[in-house]
Amino acid sequence: MKSYITVKALFFAIFLLPIFVQASDVDCENAMTTYAMNICAATEMENANIELAKYIAAVKEKYSSESGVVAALDKSQQAWLGYRESHCDAIYEIWSGGTIRGVMFGACMLQLTKQRTHNIWSDYLASMDPDPNPAMLPEPQ
């Protein structure tokens, strides 16, 4: 059984690697090795985390005068981060017998992060009415 520390170490190794490796060193359009896939997944995950943070910041700006909303968002975000990690740890376990486990873990993290970003947009930023003041940010893809 792997320890919690091992998954954390793997996560940081995979998702901080782009800091040390130039994106131009790997062709993400044609990534065929596990190493290349991990580099590309790390870059995508970094971008997804930045986008999620941007949407959360927009919510906090929009509701800056409503401390209850901001506090509830912060609480839900902390819970969601725990859920994302636990869920993707389980995916890692499913694939723990192969070198693809890191790629599958990364894909899980990316998918959930993109879903969270969309949920933040739709729940807090998107207008429900035909509104002359559209959402602060566009619908995330």
Image: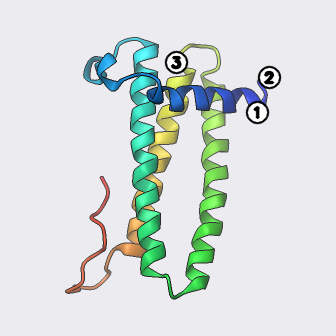
Which residue is found at the position 65% from the left and 59% from the top? 78
Please tell me in which quadrant of the rendered image residue 26 appears. top left
Residue 64 in percent (x, y) is at 49, 82
Q: Is residue 85 left or right of residue 121?
A: right
The quadrant of the rendering that contains the N terminus is top right
Mark 3 Cα shell of 10 Å, populated few (<14), some (14-19), many (≥20): some
Q: Tag 3: residue type?
A: Ile
Q: Earlier in the sequence, mark 1 or mark 3?
A: 1
Determine which of the numbered discs, if any, sits on residue 92 in the image: none
SS class of the residue under badge 3? loop
Residue 44 in percent (x, y) is at 39, 37
Mark 2 Cα shell of 10 Å, populated few (<14), some (14-19), many (≥20): few
Whole-Å distance between the Cαs marked 1 and 3? 19 Å
Whole-Å distance between the Cαs marked 1 and 2? 10 Å
Q: Is 85 located above or below residue 137 in the figure?
A: above
Whole-Å distance between the Cαs marked 3 and 2? 18 Å
Q: Tag 2: residue type?
A: Met
Q: Tag 1: residue type?
A: Tyr
Residue to which mark 3 is pinned: 100
Q: Is 116 located above or below residue 58 in the figure?
A: above
Q: Earlier in the sequence, mark 3 or mark 2?
A: 2
SS class of the residue under badge 2? loop
Determine which of the numbered discs, if any, sits on residue 1 in the image: 2
Residue to which mark 1 is pinned: 4
